[in-house]
Amino acid sequence: MGSMKLLSFSRGERPGYGAVLGRGVVDLAARCSERWPTLSAVIRAGAVGQLRDLASGLSCDFPLEEVRFLPPILDPGRIICVGLNYKSHIEETGRQMPSYPTLFTRFADSHVAHGEAIMRPSVSEQHDFEGELAVIIGRSGRHIPAAQALQHVAGYSCYNDGSIRDFQAHTSQFTPGKNFWRSGAFGPWMVTADEIPDPGQLRLETRLNGRIMQSAPTSDLMFDVPALVEYISTVFPLHPADVISTGTTGGVGKARKPPVFMRAGDTIEVELSGIGTLSNMVEDEPARPQL
């Protein structure tokens, strides 16, 4: 059935998950929700292969246009982000080349799904874009050797590590600038790892209102996916449905002259070859947001 894309979605009041087949959706939650209520539960049960086998024998239940996308992983155990991981981005920030990965964390309510509005916070004019490759862990491990790292990956997705630059610069710690409510995006789906034997052979592109802002091969990562899995799992165990966002390339808005930041009404797209395109509008955060 070609590339296996697994998505989380809602249709009416019912959240679910399924497989994308052309422009349609195979509703897998309708068949499996008693065993696995969410896509995260499928991954944690080690059942992605079973889901793939099931989907391969089914036809679409409804058009893709009828669903509202949800982030592929609704309840990630951890979201670990990597800063300064492409040489071009390190150079444009004026920093020295790192000897180890620069890690920080995001929380799940700091991102939205494909097609949802990214929120520019009312307290800042410096809402920047960062297109990234996201890695979704499929198998637990600690001290995972790089040579075995890809065996622990369930799949890949697109990530926009939306950054509030002035808050990021308040201190040497990145957390405030990287965790504003609904400031980033994750999706549109997860492509299973067997479809991408080498995550270092993809092409990353970020477009703001159709204009290419970032473009690079993932082979330019200083610390590639196996190296990141090895390093991170040295610090703490990685578990299924954890997410690693691997860092952004050069071309971010803050480094441009003059700077280019996202504004209400903009469309921001993150595309990865072999995976798909994550697309979001930008809106101003309301004065009294409904949480």
Image (cartoon, rainbow, N blue to C red):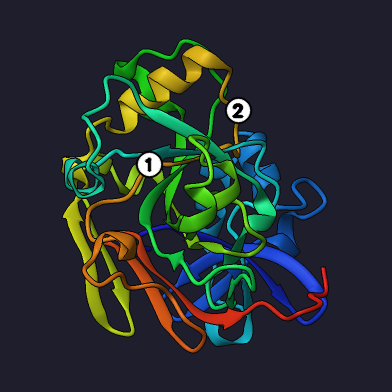
Looking at the picture, tell me which residue is in the foreground, 256 or 158: 256
On screen, 56 above or below 76? below
Residue 96 x %, y %: 22, 30
Residue 91 is tagged as none
Q: Residue sitting at 77 percent across and 52 percent down?
A: 37
Q: Residue sitting at 71 percent across and 61 percent down?
A: 29
Q: Quadrant of residue 204?
A: bottom left
Task: Evaluate if marks 2 and 1 touch, with contact meaning CB atoms under 8 Å apart.
Answer: no
Quadrant position of the C terminus in the picture: bottom right
Looking at the picture, tell me which residue is in the foreground, 229 or 17: 229
User: Left of 6 or right of it: where is 44?
Assistant: right
Say which element carries label 1. Answer: loop
Q: Quadrant of residue 228?
A: top left
Looking at the picture, tell me which residue is in the foreground, 18 or 8: 8
Q: Callout 2: 10 Å neighbours few (<14), some, many (20+)?
A: many
Q: Which residue is mark 1?
A: 246
Residue 183 x %, y %: 57, 64
Q: CA distance from mark 2 to mark 1?
A: 17 Å
Q: Residue furthest front?
A: 170
Quadrant position of the N terminus in the picture: bottom left
Q: Residue sitting at 23 percent across and 39 percent down?
A: 221
> In terms of sequence position, does the residue under pointer 2 or pointer 1 come before the other?
2
On screen, 132 above or below 82? below
User: Left of 31 or right of it: where is 183?
Assistant: left
- Note whether residue 112 is visible: yes
Q: Amino acid at mark 1?
A: Thr
Residue 76 x %, y %: 65, 43
Q: Amino acid at mark 2?
A: His
Residue 239 is tagged as 2
Say which element carries label 2. Answer: loop
